[in-house]
Image (cartoon, grey):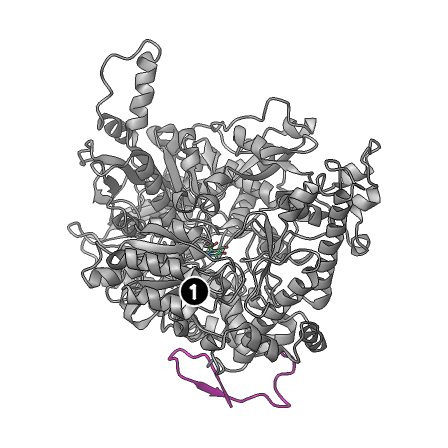
Amino acid sequence: MTSLMTPSGGARTVRGPGPLTDADSFVPRHIGPRPHDVEAMARYLGYDSLDALIDAVVPETIRFRRPLALGRGRSEIEALRSFRQVAGRNQIFRSFIGLGYYACLTPPVIQRNILENPAWYTAYTPYQAEIAQGRLEALLNFQTMVIDLTGLPVANASLLDEATAAAEAMGVAWNTRGTHERNIFFVSRDCHPQTIEVLRTRAKAHGILVVVGDHRAFAFGPTVFGALVQYPASDGAVPDFGTLRAALDASVTPMGGAASEATGAAGRDARHAAETPILVVAADLLSLTLLKPPGEWGADIAVGSTQRFGVPLGYGGPHAAYFSCREELTRQMPGRIIGVSRDADGRPALRMALQTREQHIRREKATSNVCTAQVLLAVMASMYAVWHGPAGLRRIAERIHRLAVAFAEGVHRLGYVVTHDVYFDTVRVELGRRKLSELLREARAQTINVRVLADDDGPPAVSVSIQETTTLRDMADLFAVFNGGLPAPFTPDQLADEVGAEIPEPVARRSAYLTHPVFNRYQSETEMLRYIRRLESRDLSLTTSMIPLGSCTMKLNATAEMLPITWRDLSRIHPFAPREQTDGYSILFERLEHALAEITGLPAVSLQPNAGSQGEYAGLLVIRRHHESRGEGRTRTVCLIPQSAHGTNPASAVMAGLRVVVVKTDARGNVDLADLRAKASLHGSELAALMITYPSTHGVFEEGIREVCDIVHAAGGQVYLDGANMNAMVGLCRPGDIGADVCHLNLHKTFCIPHGGGGPGMGPIAVAAHLAPYLPGHPLADVGGVEGIGPVSAAPWGSASILPISYMYIDLMGAEGLARATKVAILNANYVARRLETFYPVLYKGTRGLVAHECIIDTRPYKASAGVEVEDIAKRLMDYGFHAPTVSFPVAGTLMVEPTESESKEELDRFCDAMIAIREEIREIEEGRADRQHNLLKRAPHTLEQVVSSGWDRPYTREQAAFPAPWTRLHKFWPSVARIDSAFGDRTLVCSCPPTDAYADETVPAGSPRPARAAP
Ligand SMILES: Cc1ncc(COP(=O)(O)O)c(C=O)c1O
């Protein structure tokens, strides 16, 4: 008999493995090397067995020597059957709750060919742009869609959710306008409550004063640096915000004094504009097909969710948020921007633009800590716009609006007061003498959820949000709810015929949108399917070859783990549906929290943060709250961070209001203990926390980790362990046992959520018992600790609908399988390191000459010997059919390789063979047998077009260029563009689809591409 993870944390007994069970174990499906390979590889490394190797790698002082209390693994069929029962405990009501989440229809062509397609969901963030042109184009479409619909000239390629996007916008306003004296951020009380609370959480750490009020009555003065309004308002109203912009402009005195002749009145206006508060608008993108876009009435920034563009509700996410702004704010913009540049042949090519703003480079000076965003969901939303086109989107919006008008007319005839005259999809209904409890009882009887508006002074009210899925039957049922359970004396069709549904003039949209051919060309399924497949074929994903990205853990995302994602029991639930309807999700959360607590050795878990960066931010706020509770909140504000840390660590520390002090690393890549002691003592009473990644970003189990934790604790600080490298720890050692107080887990690394081309992810935090009371809460759900920090995500459980992936992984693997996966991950990394070390220096190793789950290959010597940069090697690997390892992190000029346990020995050997062959190509340059400029590396990657071109004039053969290894003849992956010039595109940013003639010419005209443009 064995145990499974159970809600109570206790053990549920089940029948153990026997001849009639376990027909097919999942563990060997997940783990790449076959058992005989594992033995051979261990022997190659000089050890009798895998366990002997692991004993040599993992310091005994931190070793966890019992099996995890997670029970045995299951077969795929068994686990799916069991989880189906859990999911079936959810009840699917028709939710008309709104609040930024709307039921919508995922076009089947998008569901099957993107959401359920590993070629799309297993790709990584497009760092290697030449083999990522497909998703880059889809993201450029996303940006164009956002730019057109919001009427602002620049957009990014997604953020995490609407509420955090609003908080990021407040951050931009603060960075550009805020000061200690000017520290008020006004928030309209008509914003969604979760957005208001996420802003409050974010504001507190910076001393920003969030004032929530009525924008019509508020006296904007010189202490206001920005304002946020919701459009349409949370309760449905569509106000004319024209006067708000004027009020904000008037709140700062125009700069007086004699303007110099050179600047004159125009200069004064520009300076005045640079002083005026930033107006942020949280706008519903679909409504903007009918409503005047924020860019046309004075918004500086627009944010919002693209969920209703074909992405399921999924109990809160993942969904892509958007962010667009005026050009002046471009360099302050958070998140990634896709831009147009050119390749070595002068053809248009896409890549991530302005990367120098990112936390990877700017650390504590970054514009934001956002790293993983919501790429897959942004791709889906953009494809929804491509599929429907401007006319189709307008049709969907008009139908919704018409139904909303019919609904308002119907409830009016039934004797209710409809509060607002102008609305898009959400109708606020005052209940008058009708009892709320009765209405809700009728709603329950009809399996309908409406939103109850908690208004302090006014009469009880509810709102009903009409959505794409709403049918005439739904309308009839809604009327019955408002008619005491009886059918209404009219039909929705009659009402729709009788009332007009025109949006009135001051707020009606008159400008065109989505005029680019891409939004007008692919509306037959044949064309759409081919478009999706064409883009897909330009991207290298795990379906082609291993992606050995260190610190990113590109392991198998098994089909059985992914299947539940589109189950209706999980995908059709509104995040604010009453808890009694979501038993299935509750069981999932409880079991997953229990499992993660057991794996980390930290007893309390919050599933709210929806990326690793957000886990860091949440964990640090929890630590701050802990110090506050001891009366040390104001003094303990220093965060120690080793030099080698990932850039999100310092960026998150700053977001949490902490001051970053860097700790040195020694020659072996370990934290320099002497420097740590000195800094801990220097900042003693100011020390809030140390952030440390374990095993270190140098890929080594530092022996001194316990001492590190002791030093920090002795100075009164807390230890934050960045769990991005948890794949080296599961089942072998636990953060809590080592001395960590908080740890985040990237479920999109260790726990199998696919990277989706740069998101979604999940970054839950696990904390020690003394920090449990401070876990994040939420205004609309009973979650978090008793004295919890405010919410850090829009939804109470973050991106809940992808948690089944991690749940399934843990259930499939069981305690033994999880530990074996960790061991093989370590074995694979050491195997690669050993095979390559005679060709390339391996930078950091532990005391026994071994690495953890990743290794750093030093390519710096070849710059001097052959003029070869690390980038050249990365690009040449594409010709061999591989995605490069992580480039220049944590050490510039190196490659960090993380093979994971899922790669077979054959694949590891292929990769090593490619690296070794490239080393020989470098040697040819070193020995003068190849030219220092015109060689296989400098001119990589090679496109099909180049190779077949009749003008081939390179001093190496076409065959050497394109078919450098035997396997490339069996399956050749062609980069779709040649080497991309990033700097060129950054000089003049183009972040929306260029006109098609740019492609027709096939070259970017000299001079530069079209600059960021206004909406047509
Ligand atoms: C060491 C480390 N910490 C933190 C992060 C940030 O996680 P996320 O991208 O989920 O925000 C990463 C991401 O790659 C990482 O490698």
For the record, the magenta segment spans 1-26
Point out the residue furthest to the left here. 457
At a point 24% along the width and 21% down the height, the residue shown is 254
At a point 30% along the width and 69% down the height, the residue shown is 772
Where residue 783 appears, as percent x and y from the top left, is 31, 65
Number of marks in the image?
A: 1
Task: Specify whether 644 is left or right of 632.
Answer: right
User: Which residue, given by chain and number where applicable, does mark 1 sit on?
Assistant: 92
> In the picture shown, does residue 396 fall above or below 78?
above
Task: Specify whether 214 is left or right of 107.
Answer: left
Q: Quadrant of residue 233?
A: top left
Q: Nearer the viewer, residue 931 or 792?
A: 931
At a point 49% along the width and 66% down the height, the residue shown is 726
Residue 507 in sight from this viewpoint: yes
For the residue labelled by badge 1, is the local secondary structure a helix, a strand or a loop?
loop
Q: Nearer the viewer, residue 617 or 539?
A: 617
Q: Residues within 10 Å of mark 1 (few under 14, many from 20)?
A: many
Where residue 514 appears, as percent x and y from the top left, is 53, 34
Task: Specify whether 465 is left or right of 347.
Answer: left
In the rendered structure, does residue 95 fall within the stretch colored magenta? no
In the rendered structure, does residue 7 fall within the stretch colored magenta? yes
Residue type, numbered disc 1: Ile
Name the main secondary structure of what is drawn in magenta: loop
Where residue 600 appears, as percent x and y from the top left, is 43, 71
Cβ of mark 1 under 8 Å from ligand 1: the answer is no
Q: Nearer the viewer, residue 855 or 805?
A: 855
